[in-house]
Image (spheres, rainbow, N blue to C red):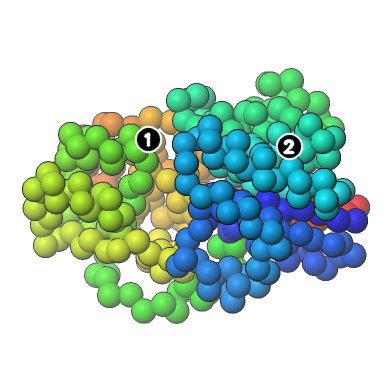
Amino acid sequence: MKILHVVGARPNFMKAAPVLKALAAHDVRQVLVHTGQHYDVKMSDIFFQHLGMPAADVNLGVGSASHSVQTAEVMMRFEPVVVEQRPDWVLVYGDVNSTMAAALVCAKLLVKVAHVEAGLRSGDRTMPEEINRIVTDSIADLLLTPSADGDENLRNEGVPEARIARVGNVMIDTLVQLLPIARERPLDVPEQFALVTLHRPSNVDEPAKLETLVEAIGAISRDIHVVFPIHPRTREALRKLAIDVPPSMTLLEPLGYLDFLALQARATLVITDSGGVQEETTYLGVPCFTLRPNTERPVTMTVGTNVLIGDDLARLRDEVGRVLRGEKRQSGIPELWDGHAAERIAKILVG
């Protein structure tokens, strides 16, 4: 059996690594294709040293572009690879443009596709990722879901039960493997701190919105120190807005996965707009407040530690206050988020 894995961005690598490792225990030939949609240099040691991930066999070198151009480039460059390799299965991960593009190519070539992290829905089609999820799930042969809500979303869309398999969350596999290493990282932070991460264009690309958010977080920093790994583009936007960051806010350069995981594990609370952080804080039991109007990971709210804040910054202050008063909400870890999702995937594919 030959299985071809397609990765395009940092989260894809984190999801594919445990699956590659699990399948390596079987009589399977694996081919790793990196589309080149995005590559995080800070992640290279994590991929190859700590996760034991092989270097990509094929790099399509697509690079950055508009959504349409990037999707088209992946399709054009990926099709000859599939024709040459003739895999039994192609595995696509997550919800980036490369995910949908690769699935489309395989559907037209009649090559079987399995979607890892299938069934997630935010209900917001203004998000490019939502379109990628819907299209990929509509054409994939096997839909590997991380949680029960994913199964239900697919059933509601008319997907036959035979195409759905709940396996758990492969990102948690990676977290479980690397958490002991992350806990050993030296951190120059106070005993109590709030970790902040913002990257969505809706939060950081509008000057007025960004200014409002930073002012609200600055107010919170009067009660608890804030650690904010910040993208250079966002830092430049703050400079142009002439926003003075108080001493109770520490701005850091973007961090690699291990350092960021170490901060998450130590944080008193996290304020974010990231999907993956909602999952990781749920596993870690750290209160998470998400600055988005919706989430494709509702299980992090119903079972986990996540609270959806949207634009209600008064509620954010109230929720942070509750945590600081020791009023943590009860939470747990979703079913099958146990570090063995990749093994279940391998068992399904290999039989």
Q: Nearer the viewer, residue 283 or 228?
A: 228
Q: Is residue 183 above or below residue 91?
A: below
Instruction: Tell me where residue 149 appears, x and y as whole percent.
Output: 62, 33
Left or right of 350 on screen, residue 285: left
Residue at x 28%, y 75% (from the top left corner): 188
Left or right of 121 on screen, residue 195: left
Distance (Cα) linking label 1 and label 2 = 32 Å
Q: Is residue 243 above or below residue 265?
A: above
* Residue 92 in view of the camera: no
Left or right of 232 on screen, residue 338: right
* Residue 113 in view of the camera: yes
Instruction: Tell me where residue 293 appears, x and y as whole percent.
Output: 38, 30
Instruction: Tell me where residue 348 appears, x and y as whole percent.
Output: 84, 49
Residue at x 18%, y 59% (from the top left corner): 249
Q: Amino acid at mark 1?
A: Arg
Left or right of 196 on screen, residue 80: right
Q: Secondary structure at mark 1?
A: loop
Q: Secondary structure at mark 2?
A: helix
Residue at x 56%, y 28% (from the top left corner): 131
Question: Where on the picture, by quarter, is residue 255?
Answer: bottom left
| Mark 2 crowdedness (10 Å alpha carbons): few <14, some 14-19, many ≥20 | many
Q: Which mark is residue 292?
A: 1
First in residue order: circle 1 vs circle 2 = 2
Where does label 2 land, which residue? 105
Give the number of the mark in front: 1 or 2: 2
